[in-house]
Image (cartoon, rainbow, N blue to C red):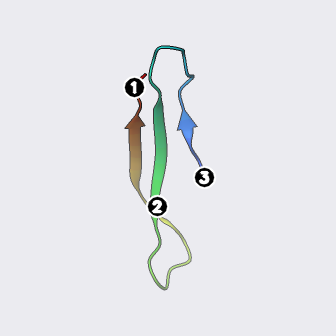
Amino acid sequence: MRGVNTQVYESGYGATWQYQVYAKKVGFTQEIPLGLAHIQTYP
């Protein structure tokens, strides 16, 4: 995936992954920003 931002990973701690979410509409050339998805992982 493009544009993934993550926190620094420390042993014993989970990480938080952040994905920018976009959509494309038929007939448009630009992506439409929908928001930010946060995914947390646990050790």
Identity of the residue furthest to the front in this view = 43
Give the residue number, with chain letter if any, for mark 3: 2
The amino acid type of the residue labelled 2 equals Tyr
Instruction: State which mark lies toward you, 3 or 1.
Output: 1
Q: Position of residue 32 (x, y in %)?
A: 45, 65
Q: How far is the residue under mark 1 from the one under mark 2?
A: 26 Å
Q: How far is the residue under mark 3 from the one under mark 2?
A: 11 Å
Q: Position of residue 13 (x, y in %)?
A: 45, 17
Decide: marks 3, 1 in contact (CB < 8 A)? no
- Which one is nearer the viewer's eye here, 11 or 2? 11
Q: How far is the residue under mark 3 from the one under mark 1?
A: 23 Å
Residue at the location (60% across, 52% down)? 2
**Helix, strand or loop at mark 1:** loop
Q: Which quadrant of the figure has residue 16? A: top left
Give the residue number, with chain letter if any, for mark 2: 22
The amino acid type of the residue labelled 3 equals Arg
Q: Position of residue 41 (x, y in %)?
A: 41, 31
Sequence order check: which comes first, mark 3 or mark 1? 3
Residue at the location (54% across, 16% down)? 10
Q: Which mark is residue 8?
A: none
Q: Which mark is residue 42?
A: 1
Sequence order check: which comes first, mark 3 or mark 2? 3
From this view, report whether residue 39 is shown above or below residue 2: above
**Mark 1: few/some/many CA within 10 Å (<14, 14-19, 20+):** few
- Which one is nearer the viewer's eye here, 19 or 42? 42
Instruction: State which mark lies toward you, 1 or 2.
Output: 1
Residue at the location (43% across, 22% down)? 43
Sequence order check: which comes first, mark 1 or mark 2? 2
From this view, report whether residue 37 is shown above or below residue 7: below
